[in-house]
Image (cartoon, grey):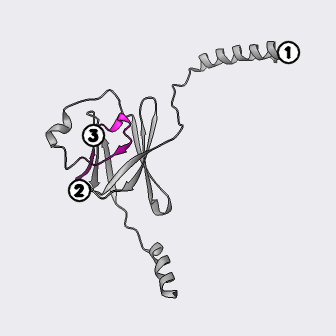
């Protein structure tokens, strides 16, 4: 029994060798992952900014000539890959579009080049344009006047 317990916790002491990746989003709506420093394409997702529920690898199913044909209305503003959890064991892909944020969690899958897929996570993050300072000053004055008249509270000027 003691040998089994020793083997169980020793897996957490193994040194993890880091790998480096380049994530690109092209104008045609494709997201591509490349290894660094050799720049080999390892993953391709078509229609990336469309808010798909699952992002899957299309490198083996899409001929290279089809990956540069079309452009899409949804424009990806920014992407960020974050490794959360113990030793970065929970990678998240954050995608910022013009008016929303998409979160994807990586998970193992039995098919594909990297044997990996991303599933979209539910969240309540909303993006809106910030008001100009002059416009917010006007709204705060209107709101404070409404409060003082309704509640009988005098606000200092």
Apparent side of residue 40 relative to residue 74 in the rendered image (left or right): left
To which residue does mark 1 refer? 152
What residue did someone put label 3 on?
A: 46
Residue 26: percent from left, percent from top:
28, 37
- Measure how far apart labels 3 and 2 are at the Cα level: 23 Å
Residue furthest to the bottom in view is 2
- Label 3 CA crowd tier, 10 Å (few <14, some 14–19, many 20+): many
In the image, 108 versus 153, the foreground residue is 108
Of callouts 2 and 1, which one flags the residue occurring earlier in the amino acid sequence?
2
Q: Magenta span covers which residues?
A: 40-58
The dot on residue 81 is none
Q: Which residue is mark 2?
A: 38
In the rendered view, tell whether residue 17 sits above or below residue 125: below
Which of pointers 3 and 1 lies earlier in the amino acid sequence? 3
Q: How far across and how far down the image is residue 14, in percent?
A: 43, 74
Task: Decide if residue 66 is in sight here.
Answer: yes
Q: Residue at x 16, y 42 (%)?
A: 64
On the picture, is 15 further left or further right than 5? left
Q: Secondary structure at mark 2?
A: loop
Asked if residue 154 shows in the view, the reply is no
Residue under the point 35% across and 34% down = 50
SS at mark 1 in the image: loop
């Amino acid at each position: 029994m003691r040998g089994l317990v020793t083997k169980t916790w020793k897996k957490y002491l193994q040194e993890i060798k880091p790998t480096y990746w380049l994530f690109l989003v092209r104008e045609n709506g494709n997201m591509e992952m490349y290894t660094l420093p050799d720049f080999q394409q390892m993953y391709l997702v078509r229609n990336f900014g469309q808010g798909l529920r699952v992002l899957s690898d299309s490198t083996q199913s899409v001929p290279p000539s089809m990956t540069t044909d079309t452009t899409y209305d949804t424009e990806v503003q920014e992407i960020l890959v974050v490794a959360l959890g113990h030793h970065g064991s929970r990678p998240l892909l954050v995608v910022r579009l013009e008016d929303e944020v998409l979160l994807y969690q990586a998970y193992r899958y039995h098919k594909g080049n990297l044997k990996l897929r991303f599933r979209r996570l539910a969240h309540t993050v909303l993006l809106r344009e910030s008001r100009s300072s002059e416009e917010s000053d006007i709204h705060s004055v209107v709101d404070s006047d409404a409060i003082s008249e309704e509640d009988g509270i005098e606000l200092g000027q």
